Amino acid sequence: MSSAYINGIGVFFPNQPVTNDDIENVLGMVNGKPSRSKKRILNSNGIITRYYAIDPVTGKQTHNNAQITAEAIQNLTAKVNFSLEELDCLVCGTSAADQLFPHHGLMVHGELGFPPCEVASTAGVCCAGVSAFKYGYMNVLSGLTKNAITTGSELVSNALRSVYFQPEIDSKVDALSKNPTLSFEKDFIRWMLSDAAGAVLIENAPRPDGLSLKIDWIDYISYANELGACMYAGAKKLEDDSLKGWREVENPDEVYQESYFAVQQDVKLLGENIIPYGGKGLSRVRAKRNLDSNKINWFLPHYSSEFFREQTYEEIAKAGVPIPYEKWFTNLKTKGNTGSASIFVMLEELLYSGNLKKGETIFCLVPESSRFSYAYIHLTVV
C-alpha cells in the first residue's frame, strides 16, 4: 500500500492578537456591564491572547470563515511552492460555516477560484478538522488522488459579540427580572474561543527538500451513545438533556429571546467526562495500535483550558500512555482555543520550529466536547 505525507502546513489568524483586557472592548459588554465570570474563567484557562475577525475600532467583521480558510491555503501553497492548478481534492472542516448551505468547502473553492476538483466538507466541532484530514489522508493513501489539501477553521467571534445576546437580556427585562444576566453556560464560552484557520498539504511522497510528516494512522472514536450533548449551538437543552433545535420552536421570537444560536457549554457535563472518556478512548487505541509512550517524542494535546492540563497528564498515564511534560507541545496561551484548527495550528508551529528531527514521532490527541468524540493521530518525521 502507498503512504501519505504532510508536506506543508499553512495557518492564518485575522488581525492583531487581542489581550484579556481588550476582549470586551472588541466583543462588547452584554447589557452594558462587564462580565462577572470573565476574570475567573480567564484565570482558569490560561489564555493570554487570541484572535478575532473583528475590527477593534469599528466592531465590524473583517473576514468570514471562507476567507480565513482561503488565506491559510494561500499561505500553505506559497510556503511549499505548490500550485492549486495541480490540486486533486479539497476537504474543509469547521464548526460553523458562513451559511447553512452551500457547504463550506464549496465556498472556499469559490473564494480561491482554482480549477475543478473533488471538494468535500466535514461537520463537527474540534474534531471537524481531523475528520477532513482523515478524508484527505484516505484519498491519498488509497491512490484515489495524488494529493489533497485539508483544512480546519473557526470563525466564531461574530457570534460572541454582545449584540447577539441583547435580545435575551431584553426579554428577561420584559419578564421583570431584577438582575438580567447571561447564563454561565453562554458567558463561559465567550472567554475561551479564537478565530483561526489551518491548511495541510497531503501528498503520496515526501518532499525531497525539508521535513515531511508521514501519516501513520488516525483513529476517531465517538461516545455519543453514552453521553448527551455538552457543547451546542442552534438549540436549547431541555430538562431531559435532549436538544430542541431552532426549527422546532412554535414562535420564532423564542430563538432570539433565548439566544438559541449562542454557543453554549454544559460545564458540569464537561468537567465530569471530557478527560475520563479521552482516556477510555486512548486505552482502546493503545491496544489496537500497540502504542508505546516510550517511542513518542512529541505529544500535542488539544485542550480548551490549562485547567485540563494536569488532568490530561494523569488520565493518559492511567490509560497506559504516560508522557512527561517535556515532550508536550501546545500554544493555547498565545493562540487561544481555535477549535477544529487547533491541532494544525500546533503542528504548523512545531514543524517549522527547527526542533524536529527525522525519525521522531508525534502523537496528537483531539477531544471534542460537543457530544464526546475523540481523535488520535500518529505521525513520523521523515
Image (cartoon, helix red, strand yellow):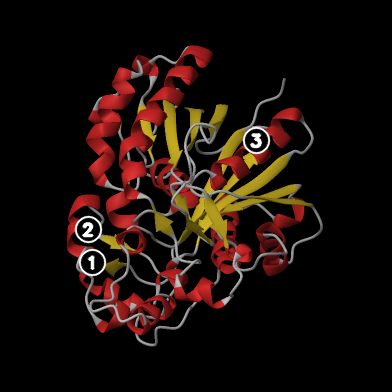
How packed is label 2: few (under 14 Cα within 10 Å), some, or many (20 or more)? some
What label sits on residue 42 in the rendered view? 2
Question: Residue, x 42% and y 45% (percent of image)?
Answer: 352
Judged by depth in the image, the label closer to the viewer, 2 or 3, is 2
Q: Is residue 43 above or below residue 54?
A: above
Identify which amino acid the numbered label 1 is placed on.
Asn
Mark 3, Cα crowd under 10 Å, few <14 / some 14-19 / many 20+, is: many
Identify the secondary structure beneath mark 1. Answer: helix
Residue drawn 35% across and 86% down? 57
Q: Residues within 10 Å of mark 1 (few under 14, many from 20)?
A: some
**Residue underneath mark 1:** 20
Q: In this picture, is 217 found above or below 339?
A: above
Displayed quadrant of residue 248: bottom right
Mark before the other along the chain sequence, 2 or 3: 2
Q: Earlier in the sequence, mark 3 or mark 1?
A: 1
* Circle 2 SS class: helix
Q: Which residue is mark 3?
A: 137
Give the residue drawn at x 36%, y 62%: 186
Amino acid type of the residue that numbered disc 3 sits on in the rendered structure: Tyr
Q: Is residue 109 left or right of residue 274?
A: right
Contact (Cβ within 8 Å) of mark 2 with mark 1: yes
Instruction: In the rendered view, tell whether residue 301 sits above or below residue 255.
Output: above
Residue type for callout 2? Leu
Which mark sits nearer the N-terminus, 2 or 1? 1
Residue situated furthest front in the rendering: 176
Q: Residue at x 37, y 37 (%)?
A: 274
Across and down, in percent, residue 175 comes to 36, 80
Determine the CA span between mark 2 and mark 1. Answer: 8 Å
